[in-house]
Each structure stands twice: as C-alpha cells, then as structure tokens.
Image (tube, rainbow, N blue to C red):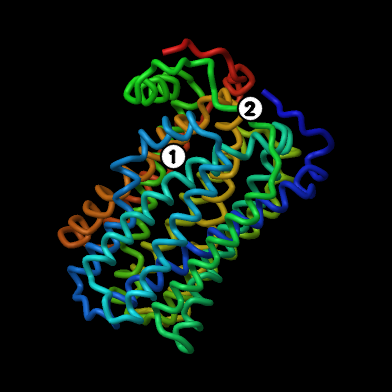
C-alpha cells in the first residue's frame, strides 16, 4: 500500500507538500495549546468561574473523544481527509472568534464558553483522526517513521512552547484576545492545508453507499481486533496510557504536597520532559535504520517504565536535600517522555503500514477510543488509591503496570511482515 511518492525518506519529508502539511499541523498544535491555557483563564478571570465550573469546562473539551471518537473514524473514512481537516480548522477558528467578540460587547457567558469548548472539542476529534490517517497519502511507507518523527517533534515543541507563549501573551493582553490569536492560527492552518497535494483517491466506492454508520464503526473495531499486530498494539497502548495517567495524575501532588517543592520545580520537571520527547523524535529515524520496530517499541516502553520508578523513589526521599529528589524527578521525566515518544512514533508508523488506506480513520479512531477511554478511570483510581494507600505506594503500582505494557510487544517482529494491508471483507 505504498503511495506514488518517490525518492528517499529524507527527500520525501523535505518535499514542499510535506513541509506545508507539517507547518499546518504545527500551527494547529500551537493553537490547541493556546486554547487549553486561555479558555480556563477566561472562565476564571473574566467570568469568575469556580473550581467545579472550570472542571466542567475541561471535561467539555475532552469528553468528545469518548462520545464520538468511534463514529468520527467511520465518517472520516467516508470523506476526503484534507478537506475534513480544513473544515475542522475553520470551525475552530469561527467558534473561538465568537468569544472575544461576545466579550467586547459584554455578552459573553459561561454557558457559551461550555458550548464553544464542546464544538472545538468535536472539531478537534475530526481533525486529529483525519490528520493521523492522512500521512500515508503524502509520503510512502518507507518514509513514515521520518514523517511521524517530525510531526511528533512539533507536538513536543508546542507542548512546551505553546503554554509558555500563551502565558507571556496573557501578561500583555487579556485572555479573550489570546483566543482571537488562536482563531487566526487555525485560519493559517487551513490556508496551508489548502495548498497541499496528495494521493488520496476520490470518495471511496468499495464499501458501498448502502452500509450504515454502525456497520462501518464495527468494521473498524473488528479489523483492529482481528489483526494480530493491531490487537497487540491496542492492548499495549491502552494499558501504557492507563498507568502513565496514574503517574502523571499524582505527579503534581507528589511535587507540591508530598515533597513541598513548589510550582517552579514542577514547571522545570515538565519542561525537561518535553525536551526528552523532542530529542527522541530527532534520533528515532537513525535508531529505526538499525533496529527492528518491535525492538524499538519494547525498548521505549521499558525505558519509560524504568524512568517512572524515579518518581516514587524521589517521593521516598522527603527528608533529603531538595536537590536529590529534584534531580530524580528531572531524570525520570526526561527518560519517561523519551521512551514514550520513541514507542509512540514507532507504533503509529506500524499501524499506518498495517492498515488498508480506506480503513485508516476507523482503525485510528478505534485505538484512540481505547487510549482516551483509559484516562478518566486511571485518574479516578489514582486519586482514590493515593488518598487511601499513599501517593508513593500508588506510584509504585503505576511503575509495575508500566513494565507490563511491554509484554504484548514481545514477539511483535515476527507478526509485522505479515501485517501488510490486505483486502478487507466489505460490510
């Protein structure tokens, strides 16, 4: 299932069309980070929202992945990916632009902020599913790792730089104005996407127009469950995200309450983690040139699990000089993010190769449903266990679970060659 793209992996990711797509995706990533920072600020500072109301706002942005994640994959497989991303970017731009306009006319309300967050969340679901399914249409199979590594590097840079830039802007202008800048960013994203040429064929005909949405959704789920490589990756990614969420949910509690190190230390720890992810995305293509995908994924997961152990160890050093637990936290976050990004880029590339192109969106949506679905129960469990058995003890459970995520990857290399896209029965 190669595209018609020719040339070496390096030349493909340096081509004009990939660079334009990469630019669009990077701008979208920064836009998302801006919104995540500015929306709660608007709620708190402009509309005087309380803690519970801010929680509802955050839920409005994320619950869409659970509610429409699976049908979104079926819809995106019926549509062309690039126009879908353009429409999603435009919708986010228009909705976000209403917030500063309503604020300027003194008509902004918390209810509208909830509505805007839900619409932006829905548009983000469609954009994310389409974007991850679009990469095989602009680069060949051999260039997937290089392409995904560059896209992940943008995600890591935006994760660190987006909130930092938004924070600086908030010192100069009000939060609604930052959302106006966010809206402009999505317009720029749509503009770059409009210039990209790809190899995606016209709307699919092979599955027939008579198939219903539920049938399409189940076809995607059955394909993931019935394909050994995808089934193992789905289990590994879901379990890995569950235990990583346990660790990350308790990290602020560990730093701020158990160790009493303050928010500045927490910012440093999280920032260094982003640097680990960025470096991982840079060196991964060279590593993959020497090692098989299965080995790289296993090493990434084991590195992440080993690095996670630094968190409960640091928590056990409550009476030690602050430099010691801080150093452990920094090393742990760096290694954990490095390992997680190494695993993630590789597994996404394996998934893209193992799936027929007309089912890419449903495959990605099915796996993302598991990934996002594991987060709420993991966060709730982490909070409950942390309160009953202690933060450090709960984190050790997360560490043990993290090592278990490598088990489905064992023997993966013998399955990957047989996971080339094959005809899928029509539904």
Residue lying farthest front? 105
Residue 323 sits above or below residue 90 on the image: below
**Residue that sits furthest to the bottom in the current view:** 172
Q: Earlier in the sequence, mark 2 or mark 1?
A: 2
* Cα distance between the residues tagged 2 and 1: 30 Å
Q: Which mark is residue 87?
A: none
Q: Residues within 10 Å of mark 1 (few under 14, many from 20)?
A: many
Residue 417 drawn at (x, y percent): 64, 20
Q: Quadrant of the C terminus?
A: top left
Name the element at disc 2.
loop
Which residue lies at the image location 26% right of the left edge and 66% below the top edge? 112
Which residue is pictured at 65% across the width and 49% down the height? 149
Q: Looking at the figure, which quarter contains the N terminus?
A: top right
The residue at which mark 1 appears reads as 237
Q: Is residue 138 left or right of residue 359?
A: right
Q: Would you place residue 348 above or below residue 363 in this image? A: below
> Which quadrant holds residue 98?
bottom left
Q: Which mark is residue 201?
A: 2
The answer to whether 66 appears left or right of 11 in the picture is left
């Amino acid at each position: 299932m190669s595209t018609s793209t020719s040339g070496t992996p390096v030349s493909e990711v340096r081509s004009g069309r990939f660079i334009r797509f990469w630019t669009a995706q990077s701008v979208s990533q920064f836009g998302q980070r801006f919104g995540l920072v500015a929306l709660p600020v608007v709620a708190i500072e402009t509309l005087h929202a309380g803690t519970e109301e801010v929680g509802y706002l955050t839920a409005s942005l994320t619950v869409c992945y659970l509610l429409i994640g699976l049908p979104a994959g079926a819809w995106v497989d019926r549509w062309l990916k690039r126009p879908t991303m353009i429409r999603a970017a435009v919708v986010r731009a228009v909705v976000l632009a209403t917030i500063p306009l309503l604020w300027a006319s003194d008509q902004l309300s918390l209810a509208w902020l909830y509505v805007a967050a839900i619409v932006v969340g829905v548009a983000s679901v469609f954009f994310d599913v389409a974007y991850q399914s679009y990469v095989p249409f602009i680069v060949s199979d051999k260039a997937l790792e290089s392409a995904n590594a560059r896209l992940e590097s943008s995600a890591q840079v935006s994760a660190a730089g987006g909130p930092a830039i938004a924070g600086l802007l908030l010192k100069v202008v009000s939060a609604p104005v930052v959302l106006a800048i966010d809206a402009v960013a999505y317009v720029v994203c749509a503009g770059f996407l409009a210039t990209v040429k790809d190899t995606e064929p016209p709307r699919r005909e092979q599955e027939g127009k008579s198939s219903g949405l539920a049938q399409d959704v189940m076809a995607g789920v059955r394909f993931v469950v019935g394909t050994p490589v995808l089934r193992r990756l789905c289990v590994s990614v879901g379990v890995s995200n569950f235990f990583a969420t346990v660790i990350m949910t308790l990290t602020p509690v560990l730093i701020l309450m158990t160790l009493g190190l303050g928010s500045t230390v927490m910012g440093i720890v999280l920032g260094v983690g982003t640097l680990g992810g960025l470096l991982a995305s840079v060196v991964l293509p060279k590593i993959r040139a020497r090692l098989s995908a299965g080995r790289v994924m296993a090493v990434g997961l084991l590195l992440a699990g080993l690095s996670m152990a630094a968190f409960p160890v640091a928590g056990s050093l409550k009476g030690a000089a602050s430099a010691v637990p801080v150093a452990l936290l920094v090393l742990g976050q760096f290694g954990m993010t490095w390992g997680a990004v190494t695993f993630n880029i590789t597994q996404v590339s394996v998934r893209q190769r193992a799936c027929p192109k007309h089912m890419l969106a449903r495959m990605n949506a099915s796996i993302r449903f598991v990934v996002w679905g594991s987060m709420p129960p993991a966060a709730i469990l982490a909070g409950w266990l942390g309160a009953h058995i202690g933060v450090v003890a709960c984190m050790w459970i997360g560490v043990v679970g993290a090592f278990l995520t490598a088990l489905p990857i064992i023997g993966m290399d013998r399955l990957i060659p047989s996971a080339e896209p094959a005809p899928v029965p029509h539904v």
